[in-house]
Image (cartoon, helix red, strand yellow):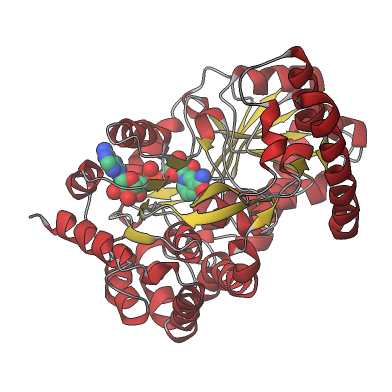
Amino acid sequence: MSREQQAVARARKAFETGRSKCVEYRIYQLKNLQQLFTEKQKQIAEAVKKDLNKSEVGTLLYETLGLEGEIDLAIRKLKEWAAPRPVEKNLLTLSDTVYIQPEPLGVVLIIGAWNYPWAVTIQPLIGAIAAGNAAVVKPSEVCVHTAKLMEEVLPLYIDKELYPVVTGGVPETQELLRQRFDHIFYTGNSMVGKLIMAAAAKHLTPVTLELGGKSPCYIDKNCDISIACRRVAWGKYTNCGQTCIAPDYILCEPGLQDRVINEVKKSIQEFYTDNPKTCPDYGRIINQRHFKRIMTMLEDSHIAVGGDNDESDCYIAPTVLRDVKPEAKVMQEEIFGPLLPILPVSGLDEAIKFINKGEKPLALYVFTADDKVIKRIRDETSSGGLLANDCLVHYSVSALPFGGVGNSGMGCYHGKFTFDQLSHKRGCLIKKLNMEGVNSMRYPPHTPKKLGWARFFILNTVDLGWMGRMALLALLAVVTAVVLQNYLF
Ligand code: NAD
């Protein structure tokens, strides 16, 4: 048995003991996870610093703060989320108990990416634990130090049989994918997303795919360009552009381009000084492979700001590209680096057309003081999420579903959405063995009269609250008695 097979078999066996289903046990595990983030902050920040050159405060702000919030929310809300959810009934089922019972799916495989290695790996785990599943956690091998630390510390805090960590690269992940899971939660690029889905299909395993793509950003002439550019520069250059929802490129009218360039440049200096290379808040490209990939994208575009780089240090300065053509290399795939192309368009109509020609993005940004522009963008395009007059912050709202559509992914998470994503919503109808007379309308011999009554009882829904239900039930009993006596027999 391979290491991967053993981990899955152990998780399955642990799930079968039933302990992960107990709500108190789930809360206990979540509290332990909470403790990990209190006690291991230093080590987490050190590992992320080695992997991505993020500052300690940067790691706490962009990675662990959100996780702490999600764990806290799950602990506070879990009993409510896991409780039966009563539903609207029809007249026929009025006296029955009808509800949705969320139940665990089983063993979930979580495959993380490297760009926010804790956030994208642990956030699905929070939902998997909350929903009562076992979970095999596979952090990205690209983040060498973080993956090692995760493998070391998770078993110290949470049930290591139920939630094992498996480290490794492509062969190990493929070996995992040959095993049978009850759900696969993958974060990463769309190409590998297709491989994941193909592997899952062999076992009919459902998948959540948190992918990426080119997230457009339209800057309208009717807006405070200085504020817009500061927010865009923050969204773009945070984590050196290696953010799944970073604004990938800017669309604006040609007359705005120079102002946009100047304002983005000002913000770069404001955030990262005149020499971002020595600024503790400016990160690095994850590795040389990605460095080379990003540098190739620069080849056929004009650099307006930045462009400095150092391969030995995986450093690429915050860069702005001007007059970029749709055919340029930088426009052919998600940039995932600190390059910000500007594509001049004649106005909103052309911007919408351009956005709709591409794959559906993970995020779509619009900057404008005009509500009609926001409404048109919302109504005439599609994307995982839509944000007006800011970047990235929709990620921090647990009450919003986070996820892609089309090529940017399927399924969603954050807050209760993660719980629901990793639960089976079981429809339950609990009937008593009395009131058999009402059922005669569905038993043969079928007659038009019985059909008429079936139509009345099934097509009328009821949502009256407790008092109303009791009153209606009494009335229904009378009507049924009359019907049975006078019409059906
Ligand atoms: P990556 O290289 O770390 O790969 C992601 C995971 O897939 C890793 O765990 C890796 O081991 C595994 N993997 C890679 N190749 C594989 C293969 N051939 N077979 C099986 N498993 C394989 O990360 P990445 O793909 O470079 O991540 C960046 C992408 O992720 C970007 O497109 C970004 O937009 C997207 N992303 C999306 C979100 C989101 O929430 N939607 C978050 C972060 C990143």
Residue 310: percent from the left, percent from the top?
37, 51
**Image vertical order of residue 183 relative to residue 257, above or below:** below
Write the residue at 70% across / 56% down. 399
Up/down of 89 relative to 470, above or below: above
Q: Is residue 408 left or right of residue 469?
A: left
Residue 389 left/right relative to 303:
right
Image check: 252 left or right of 161? right
Q: Considering the image in quadrants, where does the C terminus appear?
A: top right
| Residue 257, x across and y down, in percent | 74, 32
The quarter of the image that holds ligand 1 is top left
Which image quadrant is residue 414 in?
bottom right
Instruction: Please tell me which residue lies in front, 58 or 178.
Output: 178
Of residue 193 and residue 391, the one placed in the foreground of this image is 193
Place of residue 318 in the rendered image (x, y in percent of width and height, measured from the top left): 55, 49
Residue for point 51% across, 72% down: 23
- Quadrant where the N terminus sits is bottom left
Asked if residue 76 lies left or right of residue 5, the reply is: right
Specify the quadrant of the image occupied by residue 194: top left
Residue 19 seen by the camera: yes
Residue furthest to the left in view is: 1
